[in-house]
Image (cartoon, rainbow, N blue to C red):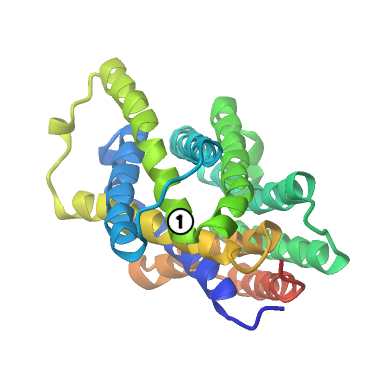
């Protein structure tokens, strides 16, 4: 095992930043249509990453094959953002939990099939424990009995979002190992900007919404900046940073931390109640994450 703790701290920090989106959403996400919000998020994230990569890394030429791989990752980013935001908009909170639970599972399975990553008993058992603990945390937040009710299109969108982020994680690993986490996160994000721009323009045209209709308030501005700078530029870089040390299936288990952080911040900042399900589930989830993260490196 690599003794460098970055492999664990980086994806853990990324998942924690995504957990913060739950609290930020209370301060104004509903002010902007979902695809347009996703476009603004990625534009800001790409701009921040480009500034950093130009200062930190020398300019280099990429092969045609690698450029196509960056574009393919941009497609995965676009699919993730659109389906995640639209799916969240169409579903109830319990159905939205699908994204959290299924994404690391899809990533583990795709890593095994696409990259021949090992699926050991320790990793499988740890992933199962983390999933059970996460479900317990979610049960303390939402009524999971409503999972089967609601909008079928929204559920389908969340399933696609889970698969798309799994693909972004797994197929980004070869580029991360060839170049760096910073470059891979930057150029894949940049590749997604024009794709999301077209979809956002279509959304605005169909809905009749104008960016001039967005209320100019600190909560809305703060939410957009949080999404763009922290949840995109910083978190996506940190997520890929973990892939410099371990395989995709190991990085994926840290995704389970997201709802735990969201619930904790909700309690600390919004005064929301947390009960025994949260405490017990968090403990089980932490054990599962520890088992997977200490099982092997690649």
**Residue situated furthest top in the rendering:** 206
Pointer 1 residue: 236
Image point (72%, 50%), residue name = 111
Q: Nearer the viewer, residue 164 or 184?
A: 184
Report the side of 229 relative to 279 (left or right).
left
- Relative to residue 167, is residue 258 depicted above or below? below
- Relative to residue 183, is residue 106 depicted above or below? above
Q: Residues within 10 Å of mark 1 (few under 14, many from 20)?
A: many
**Residue 242, x across and y down, in percent:** 57, 66
Image point (66%, 36%), residue name = 148
Q: Is residue 27 visible?
A: no
**Residue 50, x across and y down, in percent:** 31, 52
**Residue 37, x across and y down, in percent:** 31, 39
Report the side of 163 relative to 267 (left or right).
right
> For the N terminus, which image quadrant?
bottom right
Q: Nearer the viewer, residue 78 or 31?
A: 78
**Residue situated furthest bottom in the rendering:** 3
Q: Nearer the viewer, residue 149 or 87?
A: 87
């Amino acid at each position: 095992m690599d003794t460098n703790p970055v492999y664990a701290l980086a994806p853990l920090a990324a998942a924690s930043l995504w957990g913060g989106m739950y609290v930020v959403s209370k301060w104004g996400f509903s002010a902007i249509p979902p695809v347009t919000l996703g476009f603004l998020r990625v534009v800001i994230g790409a701009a921040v990453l480009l500034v950093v990569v130009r200062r930190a890394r020398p300019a280099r030429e990429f092969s045609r094959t690698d450029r196509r791989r960056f574009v393919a990752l941009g497609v995965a980013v676009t699919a993730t953002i659109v389906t995640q935001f639209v799916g969240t908009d169409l579903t109830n909170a319990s159905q939205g939990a699908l994204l959290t639970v299924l994404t690391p599972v899809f990533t583990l399975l795709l890593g095994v099939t696409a990259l021949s990553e090992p699926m050991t008993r320790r990793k499988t058992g740890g992933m199962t424990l983390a999933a059970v603990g996460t479900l317990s945390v979610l049960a303390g937040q939402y009524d999971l009995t409503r999972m089967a009710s609601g909008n079928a299109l929204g559920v389908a969108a969340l399933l696609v979002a889970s698969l798309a982020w799994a693909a972004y994680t797994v197929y980004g690993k070869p580029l991360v190992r060839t170049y760096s986490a910073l470059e891979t996160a930057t150029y894949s994000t940049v590749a997604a900007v024009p794709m999301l721009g077209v979809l956002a323009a279509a959304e605005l045209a169909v809905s009749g919404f104008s960016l001039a209709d967005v209320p100019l308030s600190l909560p809305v501005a703060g939410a957009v900046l949080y999404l763009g700078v922290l949840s995109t530029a910083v978190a996506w870089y940190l997520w890929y940073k973990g892939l410099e040390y371990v395989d995709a299936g190991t990085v994926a288990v840290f995704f389970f931390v997201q709802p735990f952080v969201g619930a904790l911040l909700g309690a600390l900042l919004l005064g929301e109640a947390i009960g025994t399900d949260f405490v017990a589930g968090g403990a089980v989830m932490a054990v599962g994450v520890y088992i997977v993260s200490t099982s092997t490196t690649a």
